[in-house]
Amino acid sequence: MSGKEIPMTNDQILNTLKKVNDPDLKRDLVSLNMIQDVRVDRDQVYVNVQLTTPACPLKDVIQNDVRNAILQDFPQVKTVQVELSSKVTKNAASGEKLMPDGVKNIIVVGSGKGGVGKSTVALNLALALVHHGARVALLDADIYGPSIPMMLGIRSVGGVPVENDKIIPIEKFGLKVMSIGFIIEEGTPVIWRGPLLGRALDQFLFDVVWGDIDYMIIDLPPGTGDIQLNLAQKINLTGGVIVTTPQNVAVLDAQKAAQMFVELKVPLLGIVENMSHYVCPQCGHQAHIFATEGGQDLATKFGRPVLGRIPLVGSIREGSDSGKPVMLTEGFSLEKQAFLEIAGNVSQEISIHNASKS
Ligand code: ADP
C-alpha cells in the first residue's frame, strides 16, 4: 500500500476534521474548538472530541463522521479511536440580567395549569441529565404545591441548612435541591406565599452555595403569574420548557404559558407532552385515550419541537409518591427512556441556543 509512505501529521488530521460539521451547530468541529486532542501512532489515530453537552443525542453521528472522514482521507489508517468528552456551554450574558455564580444555564419548566405533571417532568428531567453525566441543580419554585421534597422522599428538613450566612443545598440522588417547601409550613395560606416566595427565590438563587452547575432546572408554579414575570425580567434564563397533556382544554392553557415566555423573551426550548398515551401494564398495549396531538399542535404553533412524549403509567405516580422517581428504577422502561430522550433534546436545544449567541 502506498499509504505507508505518506506520514500523517496532526495538522493533516485537523485539516480533515475541518470538513466535519457538528450537525446541530452547522459549523466544523475544529472552528468550534471541539477537537481537544489528536494523536497519530503509525496506522492508528486517536481523536478526542469535546461535545457541548454530555447528553448529546447525536454522539454516535459525530463519532462516525469523524471516523469516516479520517478513514476516507487516509486509507493507510487501520484504526481510528474517537473518544468523547464534554463541556457544557454557558448562556451568554444578557444586559443587566443576573445569574448565580457557577451556574451555566437556567431552564424553567412551566405549564398552563396544575396537575399536568410539570413537577414530575422537572424532577425526572433533572435526574435524566444527571444520568447523562451533567452537574444539575433543581429549584422548586412551585408556590402552590411544592411537591419536589415529597417526590424525592425528603419529608421534613426543618428549614434550610446555613453555613457562614450561605444556604447549603440538600443533595439527593446526585442533584442539588432547594425547595420552597423547605421553608413554607404546609398549612400556610396561599395569600402569604407570594411575597414570601419572591424573597425566598432571590435567596435560593443567590445565597445558596450551588457550586459548578451545568443545568439548573426551576419548577415554576403553574400558569402565568408574578413569579414567572419576575424571574424572566431579572434572571438570565437560557430557556423554558412547557409541559402539557394532549387534550384541547389543557393545550389552551399551555398556549398562554408558552405565549408568556415568548412575550418575556424567554427562549421556548420546546414542548413536553405528558400522559401522551396509556400503556397497559399487562399486555403493553398503547392507547391514545385523549385522542389528540395536542403537544404537537402547540409545538407547531410556536415553531418549536416536541421534546418528548411521556406515557401515562402507574410507575410514574408510584415513584412520585414513594420518593423514588421513575428515572431511578432499575432496568429499561419506556417512561425512563422518554425522560432520557427529553434530557438529550433539551440539552441539544440549549447548545444550539448558546452557540447562536456566541
Ligand atoms: P403538576 O406539577 O403539573 O401539578 P405533578 O407533577 O405534581 O403535576 O403530577 C400530578 C400527579 O400526576 C402526581 O401524582 C404525579 O405522580 C402524576 N403523574 C404525572 N405524570 C404522570 C404520568 N405520565 N403517568 C402517571 N402519573 C403521572
Image (cartoon, grey):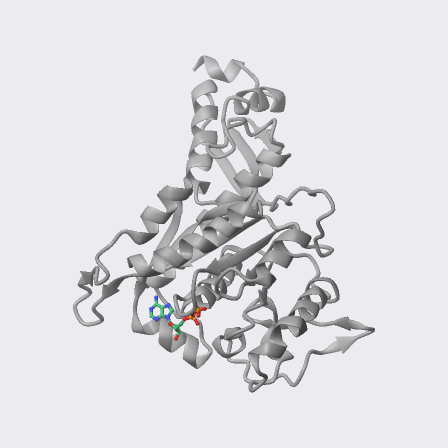
Which residue is more in the foreground, 55 or 124? 124
User: Residue pushed farthest right?
Assistant: 164
**Relative to 338, does residue 35 appear above or below in the rendering?**
above
Side (left or right) of 331 relative to 228: left
Ligand 1 image-quadrant field? bottom left
Q: Position of residue 356 (x, y in %)?
A: 58, 34
**Residue in the picture at 32% in, 60% down:** 249
Q: Is residue 102 left or right of residue 30?
A: right
Q: Quadrant of residue 289?
A: bottom left
Percent position of residue 80, x then y: 48, 32
User: Residue at point 21% right, 59% down?
Assistant: 288
Residue 34: tell me if it is visible: no
Please provide percent x and percent y for residue 349: 49, 43
Q: Quadrant of the N terminus?
A: top left
* For residue 291, above or below residue 270: below
Asked whether residue 281 is in view, the answer is yes
Rendered residue at 17%/63% (across/down): 285
Q: Quadrant of the C terminus?
A: top right
